[in-house]
Image (cartoon, helix red, strand yellow):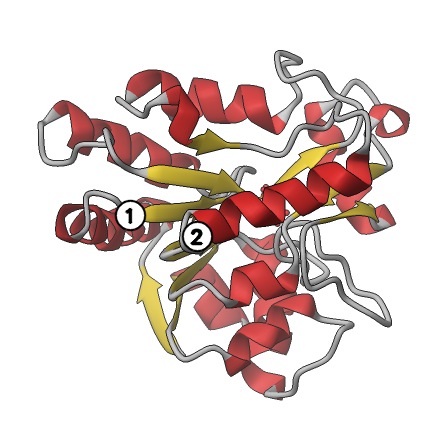
Amino acid sequence: MKLIVENDYEGLSKRASQILIKEIQKDPEIVLGLPTGSTPLGLYRKLIESYQRGEIDFTHVKTFNLDEYVGLEKYDPRSYNHYMNTMLFNHINMKPENIHIPNGKATNLESYCEEYNEDIERAGGIDVQVLGIGTEGHIGFNEPDDELNVGTSVIKLAPSTINDNAKYFKSTGEVPERAITMGLGSILKAKKIILLANGESKIEVIDRLLNRNVVTTQLPASFLLLHPDVTIIIDEEVYEGCR
Ligand code: F6R
């Protein structure tokens, strides 16, 4: 596992974008795994800027998003589909058919999850997976539990996640209770993984991840410790907080 410490969020976003830009330039047909949330916003801004400068081309890039709330229409401003379009896809030249975001309104969720898995496999798996991390250690929406799912599945969101994400809804009660998430298996099969964490709220979880050195389903991100190519980029605040 490689740990990179940057001064601040701006530095973290820049560093992550430099890695991704290089990977996209190296392989224009790259398959990217992407998160939503507040953490990757700076990275997405920098990818858009790089695209506008003509440094990267998304014509043949494929993307798979990690997760989506069950029950939200894709044009719902709180959906991850809407987030991805407004924060990234509307500003770059991705082909719509190359964008994959779980459909929270699928009628048969179980078979839909199977299809999402098959789509990932058909694309040859994820080349570079970008991750944020939840305050309780989830990656995607794989929440701490006695068992973790290998493939894409429907999960019940942890109370901590509902609380953390309530800021995007009118009230905590409006946050959907379930979500579709790529499983730990699909994430860990990615050739390269980049996890980003910044700010005070991530100190405790990154401390558990880096300093305990154990793998447990109670800290889903700990499975990353078993992967041969993981880069964790944190800011100085997280670094100082977990020394
Ligand atoms: C979102 C996702 C989640 C977030 C995590 C951190 O697609 O997969 O695991 O990365 O909840 O969220 P932020 O970045 O908002 O702190």
Give the amino acid at mark 1. Answer: Ile
User: Between disc 1 and disc 2, whose residue precedes?
Assistant: 1
Asked whether residue 36 is in view, the answer is: yes
Quadrant (top left/top right/bottom left/bottom right) for the N terminus: bottom left
Left or right: 41 as drawn, with respect to 205: left
Q: Height in image: 209 above or below 81?
A: below
Q: Which mark is residue 130?
A: 2
* Residue at the (69%, 46%) spot, across then down: 114
Q: Height in image: 46 above or below 29?
A: above
What is the residue that sits farthest to the left in this orientation?
A: 54
Asked whether residue 179 is in view, the answer is: no
Which quadrant of the structure image shows residue 112? top right
The CA distance from mark 1 to mark 2 is 13 Å
Q: Height in image: 181 above or below 84?
A: below
Residue behind label 1 places its C-beta within 8 angstroms of ligand 1? no
Residue 84 lies, in percent from the top left, at 48, 27
Residue 101 lies, in percent from the top left, at 56, 32
The residue beneath circle 1 is 30
Disc 1, SS: loop
> Mark 2 packing: few (<14 Cα in 10 Å), some, or many (20+)?
many
> Mark 1 packing: few (<14 Cα in 10 Å), some, or many (20+)?
many
Left or right: 39 as drawn, with respect to 61: right
Which quadrant of the structure image shows residue 93? top left
Residue behind label 2 places its C-beta within 8 angstroms of ligand 1? no
* Residue at the (9%, 28%) spot, across then down: 54
Mark 1 vs 2: CB contact within 8 A: no
Give the amino acid at mark 2. Answer: Val
Which quadrant of the structure image shows residue 42? top left
* Residue at the (76%, 58%) spot, across then down: 143
Residue 105 lies, in percent from the top left, at 75, 23
**Closer to us: mark 1 or mark 2?**
1
